[in-house]
Image (tube, rainbow, N blue to C red):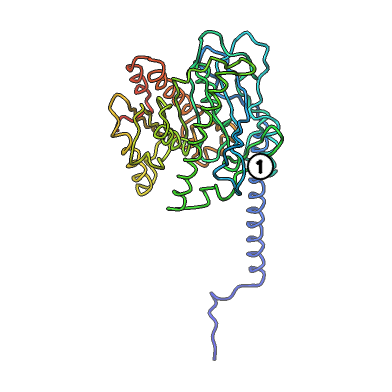
Amino acid sequence: MGSCFPSQLVAPGENMRVLRRVGRILTAIVICTFAGIAILLCGLWLDHHQETNLLAPTGHYAVGRITYDWRDPNQQEPLAPHAGVPHEISAWIWYPASAQTAAKPVDYFPLSWRNALSQQRGWFLTNFLWRDFSRVHAHSLEAPPLAPEQQSYPVLLMRAGAAAEIAGYSSLAEDLASHGYVVVGFDAPYRSTMVVLPDGRKIARTSQNNADLLSGNQQKQLGTLLVQAWSSDMSFALDQLKQLNASDPTDRFKGRLDLARVGVFGHSLGGATALQFCHDDMQCKAGADVDGAPLGTVINEGIKQPFLFLLSDHSREPKSETTPVLADLHSIYDRLPADRRLWIELKGAGHFGFTDLTVLPLHIAHLLNIVPMSDDRQVEITRDCLRTFFDVYLRGAPPSALSSLSTYPEVDHSH
């Protein structure tokens, strides 16, 4: 005969009360979740429409900006998806400008570029995870005359990280131009995230050129090919600058570019490109690698030019990832004479904090730990490091000027 313990008996009414209580809890959770999502999306939407000014240049020159489409029909694009594509790059030039000008401010990204990038990203990413580029304000003027104070100005070639558009480094370029440098950056079809050419063509990066889709040796092999292509672009850009220096139809740059004083710098893959270019081309007189892992023959063969190695804080990253990269950097750095090298690590700096991250909603950037430093601090220090380094090695400033960089509390002195 079976038995039933009293403690196992539950009245039907009690069951209903428990179910109703659980239902109310689940309903509250659902409501809170949707409310949280709504608040987040509302905040992102408002942030998307926020007016934003890039960090102001610190030099005494006004800054001009002009773009060119440089094309060589006799040379093929090395990483095009099919043969027969002429080599072509979209060049952006920031330069010291005459203060006596009626030139209007430039758009941070021109309308055609904004539309192309919006189409590529899609409606949600464009409107919720990026600032409205039409509301991001740079400090450059549209194609004014070159400043008359100097007969000629040294040239700096600049390369972005991975496939990033070069305009995303305007804060660095504008500051250097305000101190008397002509800064030349460029994007390339099929390798940059997006390029919009003067005839209206919109050419995105191909999946075959996206190293983020690969890992291990395959990623390294593709990275090496990309570095070689970007390094070749730097030589091509110098050829075009020589032509402008000889016979600029507008006379803006004719005889005004000091191509005996050429520096180069880049971020991430652009830093690797700067290293390889200085290895390949002796027109480079000084260079800077901003948080880039070296690739190519430069690792084993080194460079001869003065070089700045500017690194973010990698102390929290796995040693298995950072040790090989640091070893490659040291294989280049250690072979340079002490008076031709500079190593700076910034405590608390993030890899992406060297860019114009004001185009991202800043709270999202902090949430993803993209911007460990506060506000524009990382860009401020980076601009000072680049400017001081190139002043010493391209303009003859006293080497003692470099010691001022060690006074930043963020500079790690343990190296």
Q: Secondary structure at mark 1?
A: helix
| Quadrant assignment for the N terminus | bottom right
Where residue 68 appears, as percent x and y from the top left, is: 62, 27
14 in relation to 377, above or below: below
| Quadrant assignment for the C terminus | top left
Where residue 276 appears, as percent x and y from the top left, is: 42, 36
Which one is in front, 154 or 132? 154
The three-letter code of the residue at mark 1 reads Leu
Task: Give the left or right position of residue 310, taking residue 11 as reference.
Answer: left
Which one is in front, 144 or 230? 230
Q: Residue at x 56, y 27 (%)?
A: 240
When asked about the image quadrant of residue 198, the answer is top right
When asked about the image quadrant of residue 121, the answer is top right
Is residue 203 among what the camera can see? yes
203 in relation to 145, above or below: below
Q: Which residue in the structure is indicated by mark 1?
A: 41
Task: Give the left or right position of residue 266, taking residue 99 as reference.
Answer: left
